[in-house]
Image (cartoon, helix red, strand yellow):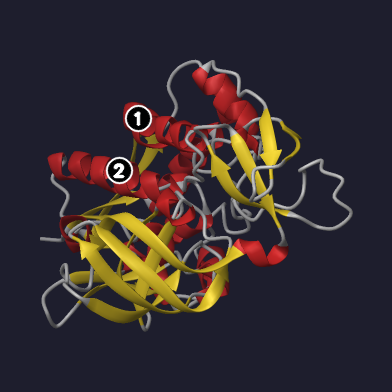
């Protein structure tokens, strides 16, 4: 009897090809599109064409029909609201820069989808992410970078648990992006030439501050731009408008480029500094999740990434307690941002990661 796999289908080329590949490998495949928005949020759905858009379910249904597989729409709007939207707004209002894709992957695209799929009798879930699930010699499951470095998505998946990884298949991680599009063309899939979605799906215009204001019903209050000594340099629009390392859109006439180096929600101050002030070698992270290794004592050498498009750099990861680590880079890193993830790699395998803490800037 064939093993059953539920594929999370967003209506894009990657998840569509994932379903196609699994069929070729002999799995019994069903497609699921996740409904992420509650009633009343149709405006946002209509404004974007990504995995949150109204078109996603229809395009996924048509692809499933082409492939001859069953297709379902599952309502995960409650989980999405709690673990993604509420988290996103709260982090910005607390002076941190969240990564909603990481939260969505962990709690919606995996935890909720896996639970619902197991209830339907599935053996595995699958997605169109560019990553590979492997089993290490120590018996632990881990993520390995995809074949195509330019599309690798392991950074955004570091929070997946051992149980989730053990029941996950990522077929397109073995392919270059061009090869995935070619497979879609060969299969005659109607989404073969659909463009990739790059923005945060629920804020397609990039207007984070206005989205948070609409979502929470609380208007962000202005505050002071200050230098590192506390001298007032001007008035800002509200802390949700800014992130560490930001240069553009500050509205300060300083005569030379300046950058956001710290955000202080307690006093509503945004600290402004020079280019060199944006670099640091040390950070601390909490909410740790380990993959290829169990929790460890002491320290270990690794390569760490501090944002999705960061190339990664050599460092020492030192455990301070069971859920806090100190990361010391060999070279200073630009714009270490509280709320973002730091992910540790051993070669091309994810060791684990955590959330960058604000305490780095208060020492």
Estimate the x, y position of residue 50 in percent, counting from the top left. Answer: 55, 43
- The residue that label 1 is drawn on is 82
Q: Is residue 341 above or below residue 137?
A: above
Depth check: 288 or 50 in front?
A: 288
Write the residue at 13% across / 45% down. 121
| Contact (Cβ within 8 Å) of mark 1 with mark 2 | yes
What is the tally of numbered marks visible in this picture?
Answer: 2
Give the crowd class for mark 1: few <14, some 14-19, many >=20 residues within 10 Å: few
Sequence order check: which comes first, mark 1 or mark 2?
1
Write the residue at 49% across / 43% down. 96
Residue 129 in view in this figure: no
Depth check: 172 or 252 in front?
A: 252
Estimate the x, y position of residue 101 in percent, counting from the top left. Answer: 44, 48
The label shown at residue 164 is none
- The residue that label 2 is drawn on is 107
Write the residue at 27% across / 43% down. 113
Write the residue at 52% across / 22% down. 215
Give the crowd class for mark 2: few <14, some 14-19, many >=20 residues within 10 Å: some
Depth check: 341 or 84 in front?
A: 341
Residue 338 in view in this figure: yes
Say what secondary structure mark 2 lies in.
helix
């Amino acid at each position: 009897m064939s093993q059953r796999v539920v594929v999370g289908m967003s209506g894009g080329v990657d998840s569509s090809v994932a379903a196609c590949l699994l069929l070729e490998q002999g799995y019994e495949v069903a497609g699921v599109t996740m409904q992420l928005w509650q009633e009343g949020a149709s405006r946002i759905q209509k404004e974007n064409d990504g995995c949150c858009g109204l078109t996603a379910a229809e395009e996924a249904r048509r692809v499933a029909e082409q492939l001859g597989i069953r297709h379902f729409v599952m309502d995960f709007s409650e989980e999405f609201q709690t673990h993604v939207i509420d988290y996103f707004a709260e982090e910005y209002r607390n002076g941190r820069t969240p990564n909603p894709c990481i939260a969505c992957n962990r709690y919606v695209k995996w935890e909720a989808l896996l639970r619902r799929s197991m209830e339907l009798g599935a053996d595995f879930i699958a997605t169109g992410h560019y990553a590979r699930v492997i089993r290490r010699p120590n018996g632990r499951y881990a993520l390995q970078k995809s074949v195509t470095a330019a599309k690798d998505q392991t950074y955004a998946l570091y929070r997946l648990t051992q149980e989730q990884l053990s029941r996950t298949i990522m077929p397109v991680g073995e392919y270059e992006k061009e090869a995935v599009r070619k497979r879609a063309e060969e299969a005659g899939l109607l989404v073969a030439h659909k463009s990739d979605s790059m923005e945060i799906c629920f804020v397609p215009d990039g207007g984070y501050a206005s989205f948070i204001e609409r979502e929470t019903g609380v208007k962000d209050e202005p505050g002071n731009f200050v230098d590192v000594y506390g001298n007032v340099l001007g008035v800002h629009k509200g802390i949700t408008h800014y992130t560490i390392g930001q240069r553009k859109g500050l509205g300060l006439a300083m005569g030379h480029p300046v950058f956001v180096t710290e955000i202080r929600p307690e006093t509503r101050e945004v600290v402004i500094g020079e280019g060199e002030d944006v670099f640091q070698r040390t950070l601390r992270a909490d909410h740790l999740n380990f993959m290829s290794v169990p929790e460890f004592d002491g320290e270990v050498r690794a390569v760490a990434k501090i944002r999705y498009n960061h190339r990664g750099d050599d460092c020492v990861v030192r455990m301070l307690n069971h859920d806090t680590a100190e990361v010391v880079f060999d070279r200073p890193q630009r714009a270490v941002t509280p709320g973002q993830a730091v992910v540790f790699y051993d070669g091309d395998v994810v060791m684990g990661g955590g959330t960058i803490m604000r305490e780095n800037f208060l020492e």
